[in-house]
Amino acid sequence: MDGDVDLHELYRVAAPRLTAQMFGLTGDYAEAQDAVHEAFARVLARPARLRGVDNPEAWLRTVAMNVARSRHRRRALFDRLVRTGRLPRDEVAPPLSPDHVALVAELQTLPRVVREAVVLHYIADQPVAEVASALGCSVEAVKTRLLRGRRALAVALTDREATRA
Amino acid sequence: MREPDFAGLVESGRQAFRPDWDDVVAKAARKRRFLAAFGAAAVALVVAAGGGLATGSFGGADQPRPEPTGSPYALEHFAQNPVPGRSPIPQISVTSYAVAGDLDHLYVPVRDCRSQCVDLIAATADRGRTWTSAVMPGGKINASRFVVAAAGETVVAVVRGRPDARGDRTADYSTSTNAGRMWRPAPVAEVAELPADWVSIEVVRDRLIGLDPRTGDLASVALPILEARVLATPAEPSERWLFGYTGTEPTGKRGKLRYVGKSLAVSRDGGRTWSVRKLPKDDVFSDVTVANSKRVYALYQSSSAYAQRVFRSDDGGRTWDDGTEVPVEVGQNTIYGTADGGAYLSARERLFHTSDGRTVREVRDAPPPYARIVPVYGGGYLAVSLWSQFGMSVSDDGRSWTRLETPVLRL
């Protein structure tokens, strides 16, 4: 990975996928795309960072996830201000079907560790062992989180459907 | 029950993406300007000193751990169980002894507490010149997590449970065959004997655990002695040496037992049969070490604080001499044998060497006192010091030592 051309190509291929994954994680499409752009910008500023990395997309995903986490923490204060009504906040969402909007909304209700496991496994299509490695926990812990997450989502989506009906 | 449509969500999310490469380029340009303004070296220094600005911006916390390029952190601090908020701690600490897979492959347990604490393993494949890190297995930080053995790129980590009524702990092992990058749980199979080339790791619940250096599989064999521990020895790999007790006897307190009959147990057939050999005596015992298949030393306290008593056996512990008082003041009370028949004794801030157990000389160009000196799989020795600072030395022959540079981990 050396220079803008390769990175540009990687951006073209991987950025849509990564953004979809970060969207599942953050529930905010603009935030998701910004985190992915931030990850690419860090590599573009210092291309040596990708030297020797076997899987650049996985590396970028990890950076983007960490960026999203950091921003989430920093935004906590900002969000409190928003809730007091002192600042307006724009909700940005892509044109999605109601079902997908509901799914993203319910993902945000899951605990962070569960949500990350669900996003990495079901949306980023990572094997359980790789999810465990990325999250720094055991395979058993990932399986437990996936089970909890999937069960919670299924219940919540069923409830939503019943309410709509 | 309605199942979530993840595939549809991914496809919708991808289709909604509007490429904006210019935004990436603009962000990267801002970062380059910032880097140029402050200088990469200054940034590295600030980060090494614990500067939150640099950590957050170029961060460690934002980078995936396997990435070898990042901010440098020197592994020079030892803290057994660092937890933020309890005491002033460095952000990156060594938490226990390093382990060698061979003289080139070294592994160091590390705790990274720059933000949320995480246990890492630092690894080198070039005798300490460059280091990488990966997350240790077993979930959140744990004071009972250790790297217990290695053979080449095969590494074993353990998380120990709380002691039960007998004082025994459970042990959940994980092994890696690629120098700690990927781990898998490693259950311990009970077998009648360990293959000759398997490495003896430790004793748990009166069974010796062995490691297959190729696959990372673990197995255990029964032992003839109690409360045993493995004696790391530079003797033949197929020889397994243990120290333990042959029995128990009541103490003055009701229901309390004490272990008696300090002994060596030696097996040359993978633990199928054992030869049990009594140490010279039970009382005032300090330590025992195996230099080679014949020469064994047992260290005992003496009546003086400025001398210790060394017993020597030249037939593998079957018979012992009468012991010699050597002028080594009380220190860590440990003795480490080397294949040439000699041994190191650590004293208060001094390290001594004996070639025969009868005379000692102080050595200065060797590992520091209180270093733990262990033979390495494949030959050679590793000395690890956690005394005041973390440090490592390696030796091919147990006589001449090379002090390794302070490991620098990029995170």
Image: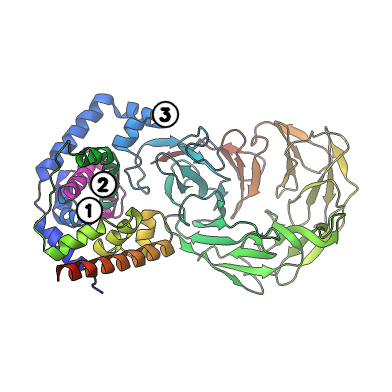
Q: Amino acid at mark 2?
A: Ala
Secondary structure of the residue carrying tag 3 is: loop
Q: Quadrant of the N terminus of chain B?
A: bottom left
| Picture disc at residue A68 | 2
Task: Give me the residue at 86% from left, 59% from top.
Answer: B250
| Viewer-closest of B15 and B152 | B15
Residues at marks 1 and 2 touching, judged by CB atoms closer than 8 Å: yes
Q: Chain of mark 2?
A: A
Q: Amino acid at mark 3?
A: Ala
Image position of B279 with respect to B189: above or below: above
Q: Do the dots labelled 3 and 1 sit on one chain?
A: no
* Magenta-highlighted residues: A30-59
Q: Which residue is mark 1?
A: A22
For label 3, the crowd category at 10 Å Cα-Cα, with few meaning under 14, some 14 to 19 and many 20 or more, is: few
| Left or right: B393 in relation to B91 | right
| Left or right: B32 in relation to B396 | left
Residue with the most extreme right position: B322
Which of the two marks, 3 or 2, is nearer to us in this view? 2
Asked if the magenta segment contains residue A53, the reply would be: yes
| Left or right: B321 in relation to B200 | right
Q: Could one spot residue B270 in this view of the protein?
A: no
C-alpha gap between disc 3 and disc 1? 33 Å
Q: Which residue is mark 3?
A: B49
